[in-house]
């Protein structure tokens, strides 16, 4: 069975997947350029990270059985076309939640503490310790609003609480 690892992945991913799958059953191929990805026609399983799987990709790979979307969503896959061709679509919910929630916290802190303003001033040779004093804020004793209470939203909530913030959330799917 031909497994295509499509997109750019962290170092060592290809070797780990190849090692986990028995060689006599699976042939793991690494495809990391758009040109190669859009010209492949014999994938049976596509592990998809950055690239998209529109109808054309699904129809061109006539033996395709499954698309595994590396990440939480599946908006990069033409679900209707996959269904029409009997292609199973799955994803890895929560796999990137830690990294995304950390990035959200990083951005909150950077904006709240005027990091880019300070960095710009430092590049100009200015020390701005007090310049942004009245327009910056900490997370301590603040309420952070979170839209979505999935894996990422829950991790953001836990992390901002460690900074002394409380949280409120809105989630369309949670009553």
Image (cartoon, helix red, strand yellow):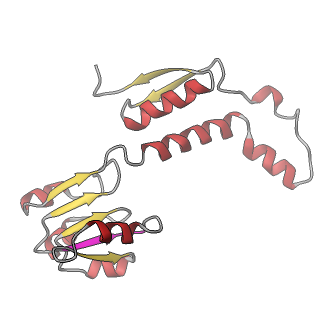
The residue sitting at 39% across, 77% down in the picture is: 33
Q: Nearer the viewer, residue 149 or 60?
A: 149
Q: Is residue 7 magenta?
A: yes
Query: Residue sitting at 27 percent across and 72 percent down?
Result: 4
Q: Is residue 136 above or below residue 103?
A: above
Judge by depth and name the residue closer to the eye, 55 or 43.
Answer: 43
Residue at image x 24%, y 65%?
54
- Residue 19 is situated, as x and y percent measured from the top left of the image, at 31, 70
53 above or below 113? below
The percent position of residue 10, horizontal first and vertical second, equals 46, 64
- 151 lies left or right of 86: right
Q: Nearer the viewer, residue 161 or 74?
A: 161
- Position of residue 75 relative to residue 33, above or below, is above
Residue at 12% in and 65% down: 65
Q: Quadrant of the C terminus?
A: top left
Highlighted magenta segment, given as a residue range: 2-8
Q: Is residue 26 left or right of residue 73?
A: left
Quadrant position of residue 52: bottom left
């Amino acid at each position: 069975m031909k497994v295509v690892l499509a997109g750019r992945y962290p170092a060592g991913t290809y070797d780990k997947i190849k090692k986990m799958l028995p060689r006599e059953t699976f042939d793991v191929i690494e495809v990391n350029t758009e040109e190669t990805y859009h010209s492949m026609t014999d994938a049976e399983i596509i592990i998809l990270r950055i690239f998209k799987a529109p109808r054309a990709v699904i129809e061109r790979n006539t033996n395709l059985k499954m698309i595994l979307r590396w990440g939480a969503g599946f908006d990069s896959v033409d679900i209707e076309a996959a269904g029409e061709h009997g292609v199973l679509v799955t994803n890895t919910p929560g796999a990137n939640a830690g990294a995304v929630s950390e990035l959200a916290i990083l951005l909150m802190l950077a904006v709240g503490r005027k990091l880019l303003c300070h960095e710009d001033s430092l590049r100009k040779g200015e020390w701005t310790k007090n310049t942004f004093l009245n327009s910056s804020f900490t997370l301590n004793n603040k309420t952070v609003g979170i839209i979505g209470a999935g894996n990422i939203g829950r991790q953001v909530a836990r992390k901002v609480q460690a900074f002394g913030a409380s949280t409120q959330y809105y989630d369309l799917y949670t009553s």
